[in-house]
Image (cartoon, rainbow, N blue to C red):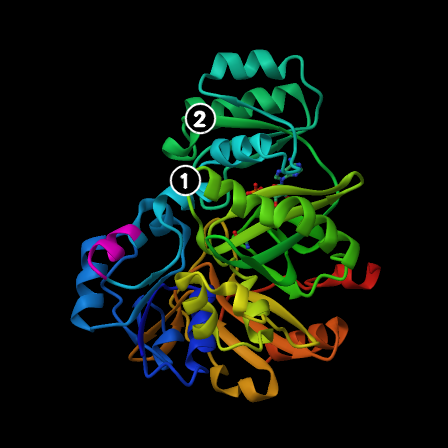
Amino acid sequence: MKVLIVGGGGREHAIAVSMKKSKRVEKLYCVPGNAGIAQIAECEPSIGVMEFDKVVAYAKEKAVDLVFVAPDDPLVGGLVDACEAAGLRTFGPRANAAILEGSKAFSKDLMKKYNIPTAAYETFDDADAAIAYLETADMPIVLKADGLALGKGVLICNTLEEAKAGVKEIMLDKHFGSAGNRMVVEEFMTGREVSVLSFVDGKTIKTMTSAQDHKRAKDNDEGLNTGGMGTFSPSPFYTDEVDEFCKKYIYQATVDAMAAEGREFKGVIFFGLMLTPKGPRVLEYNARFGDPETQVVLPRMKNDIMDVIDACIDGTLGQVDLQFEDNAAVCVVLASAGYPESYQKGFVIDGLDKFDEAEGYYCFHAGTKQTAEGIVTNGGRVLGITAKGANLKEARANAYAATEWVSFENKYMRNDIGKAIDEA
Ligand code: AMP
Ligand code: GLY
């Protein structure tokens, strides 16, 4: 079959590599793609993920059998609906279900209504009302812009002054654009964070192996929030006990809640969990694969990804035995120095040909571009270097060894990805 992947980052490269392994896939296409994806798929860099008419026309022209929509913006904006309306078989939630990620107020109300454990919260459409509430609230407290904000619309405030400044930033100065027309104010929770991705067919949910991200730019979780600087999988903190709790109170409950609301969810639900002293709580939902979680989860999946995708679309996920390798993987992101603020790009990357997937080494491209001089850096996050190992420590050593194979002028990485493993 022929498949079109919509997206162009490290996550999409990992999805493409996973699909390429399938005997059922004869040809891959990707819009807009990147230089790494272009090694295994035909890419069309001129089409953006929000240009729905162009994406649909391209899928029709190439007569693809499946469209896979990976990023949040087109999912929330309704690209799956647009593809389906054009008669294209499509993987991902429709807009009415992607709202699970698209509106924090929606997801919080859903969790409250269906008793799914999460932080206590209030929703505000008005800055004065929000400030009046904050004046009586306990600090620290968490402010969240309602809509999509590139993962950056969350402010953790330690004092009332910070919280007031945060309300101004989100609701009045519109730092995150229209995402801040509405705001959620949430109880501050403490604990370890775990990401659990899952496949969902509308009724049945099958969780994948767990992972942990590192959101901050600098070692020891200092610096600004980023899209993610590295991941490891599985999380040693995601114990059988935690899994049992989440199965009982969170996973199926979420799928059932969406169905009960007339918003049947088909695709991937990403549960951002916090393991608090009072038990696991949902921090956030995403309606898609995570980036860079996918880069450590999919390389460990034993199933043919096309079989799982078909089962999600056809509502037969209950018949799938989802299996993961009994090993570990670590992904270290190589970024451009200065990310997530200002950075230079356009530097030639050396050493990209040293990676052998059969040996458990992957070089996923995030921000790269092919030029006459070779493949050059083209973004803040440039590459995701993933390595497997028999256990987490071995995978981490392998991943860091592999980061040395690649060089470019302003290469930057965190040196403590997976440090938490030592505390397990
Ligand atoms: P989110 O985009 O909702 O995942 O939030 C981004 C990050 O902010 C999370 O990964 C957490 O580290 C932090 N965070 C979000 N909500 C809370 C909360 N209620 N308490 C403590 N930290 C939070
Ligand atoms: N790694 C977090 C995300 O994909 O949103």
**Residue of label 2:** 182
Residue shown at the point (65%, 61%) measured from the top left: 210
Q: In this view, does 16 lie above or below 125?
A: below
Q: Could one spot residue 407 in this view of the protein?
A: no
The image quarter in which residue 45 lies:
bottom left
Residue range (magenta):
81-87
Ligand 1 is found in the corner quadrant, namely: top right
Instruction: Inspect the image, locate mark 1, and give the three-letter code of the amino acid beneath it.
Output: Gly
Residue nearer the viewer, 318 or 41: 318
Question: Image quadrant for the N terminus?
Answer: bottom left
- Residue 75: horizontal and vertical position, in percent? 37, 50
- Residue 258: horizontal and vertical position, in percent? 48, 42
Q: Does the magenta stretch include residue 85?
A: yes
Q: In what element is the residue under mark 2? A: loop
Instruction: Inspect the image, locate mark 2, and give the three-letter code of the amino acid beneath it.
Output: Arg
Say if disc 1 is inside 8 Å of ligand 1.
no
Residue nearer the viewer, 320 or 237: 320
- Residue 108: horizontal and vertical position, in percent? 55, 33
The overriding secondary structure of the stretch rendered in magenta is helix
In screen coordinates, is 150 left or right of 32?
right
- How far apart are the alpha carbons under marks 2 and 1? 23 Å
Residue shown at the point (19%, 59%) measured from the top left: 54
What is the crowding at mark 1: few (fewer than 14 residues within 10 Å), some, or many (at least 20)? few
- Residue 298: horizontal and vertical position, in percent? 54, 71
Q: In what element is the residue under mark 1? A: loop
In screen coordinates, is 196 left or right of 317?
right
Question: Image quadrant for the C terminus?
Answer: bottom right
**Residue of label 1:** 262
What is the crowding at mark 2: few (fewer than 14 residues within 10 Å), some, or many (at least 20)? many
Q: Could one spot residue 49 in this view of the protein?
A: yes
Say if disc 2 is inside 8 Å of ligand 1.
no
Residue shown at the point (45%, 56%) measured from the top left: 343
